[in-house]
Image (cartoon, rainbow, N blue to C red):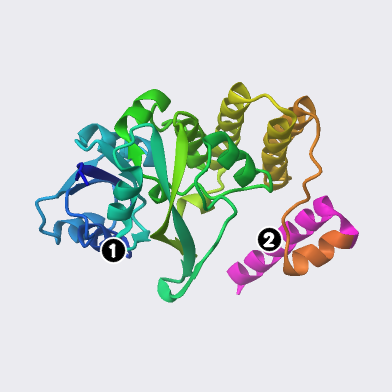
Amino acid sequence: MDSPLVSICMPAYNAESYIAEAIESVLKQRYKNLELIIVNDGSTDKTLEVINSFYDQRLTAITIENSGQCSAANKAFYLSKGSLIKFMDADDIISPNFIGLQVEKLNGNEDSIASAAWGRFNNNDLSTFKLNPESVWKDMQPIDWLKESLLCGQNMMQCALWLIPRGILTRSKLWDERLSLINDFDFFIRVLLSSNKILFTPNAILYYRSGISNSLSGLKSKKGFESAFLSTKLGTESLLRFENSYIVQKIAANQFQYWKYQFYPTDMELYYKCKKEIKRLGSSKQKMEAGGITKFLNSFLGWKLTKLLKIFIDVFYKTKKNTN
């Protein structure tokens, strides 16, 4: 088997608590012909110190003014030399044979993308790790993968899952630097639809870290909400350009339905924009995701009153805490 150079592109922002594990999981790969390019995105903690504690000629690190994850990822790509590219977050871990197995799966195929298995671990405790099997864990056509993955709502497109030939990224274009929240939705729809096949690599395992309070997925500010809407619009438009079928229209409507629930009542402008998109696409019967007390309240109050009540309770307890 040929041993092409693999470039791992890792943006990092205030990742001092976990980036060492991410770096170690890359540098300890059994596959040796790789380079790790870390772009420190203006971190204000000790991220750079942690990075500089590693001495390996395969590791390149630069620091830039804080520009966002997409800009840092693109910068890492521009510095890369590999014919195969993997984007990886600074808080995740990959199994020791991850890259070698994906290289073997691709076997020189420049028009396919290798995927992988994944599971979550919580509170920095790897003993909590559990695989999260999905129906798309098999070799598939990209449009079929996307339809099956997205039909039931939000999906998993985490960047470290994929090993991507450079030529595919040339066709798909890189990360949209306007985006912050769910930037992977737009990006990986474009990337996958620029390939001919997705090749599943069952024994390549991504350990996905959950429970980080200030992680990108938790930044639901005005800017974050605007990014989520734009990424959803861009991603669904890419899907519809590729296949404007009833099922793709339903998937697109469901994506906007999910964010409609998230935006209410915090951002009513985006809420109404989502309603307009859903109407244009037909309709969506997807219900608001809920569990525990939220699911109980939703069953007889309805989702709008449930959300308003939860916001009132949160404000009440924050006010009470601040006055004590």
The secondary structure making up most of the magenta span is helix
Q: Secondary structure at mark 2?
A: helix
Which segment is the magenta one?
Answer: 300-324
32 displayed left or right of 181: left
Tell me residue 31's x, y (percent). 21, 55
- The answer to which of 85 and 128 lies nearer the viewer is 85
What kind of residue is marked 1? Pro
277 displayed left or right of 54: right
- The answer to which of 47 and 37 lies nearer the viewer is 37
User: In this figure, which residue is indicated by the disc labeled 1?
Assistant: 96
Q: CA distance from mark 2 to mark 1?
A: 46 Å
* Residue plotted at (81% across, 53% down): 303
Viewport quadrant of the C terminus = bottom right
The circle on residue 265 is none
Vertical order, 46 against 138 (above or below) = below
Of badges 2 and 1, the one in the foreground is 1
Tell me residue 301's x, y (percent). 88, 58
**In which quadrant of the rendered view does residue 50 lie?**
bottom left
Asked whether the viewer can see residue 193, the reply is yes
Vertical order, 225 against 316 (above or below) = above
Label 2 neighbour load within 10 Å: few <14, some 14-19, many 20+: few
Residue positioned most to the top: 241
Asked whether the viewer can see residue 15, the reply is no
What kind of residue is marked 2? Val
User: In this figure, which residue is indicated by the disc labeled 2?
Assistant: 315
Vertical order, 323 against 176 (above or below) = below
Residue positioned most to the bottom: 127
* Residue plotted at (86% across, 54% down): 302
Vertical order, 273 against 312 (above or below) = above
43 displayed left or right of 276: left
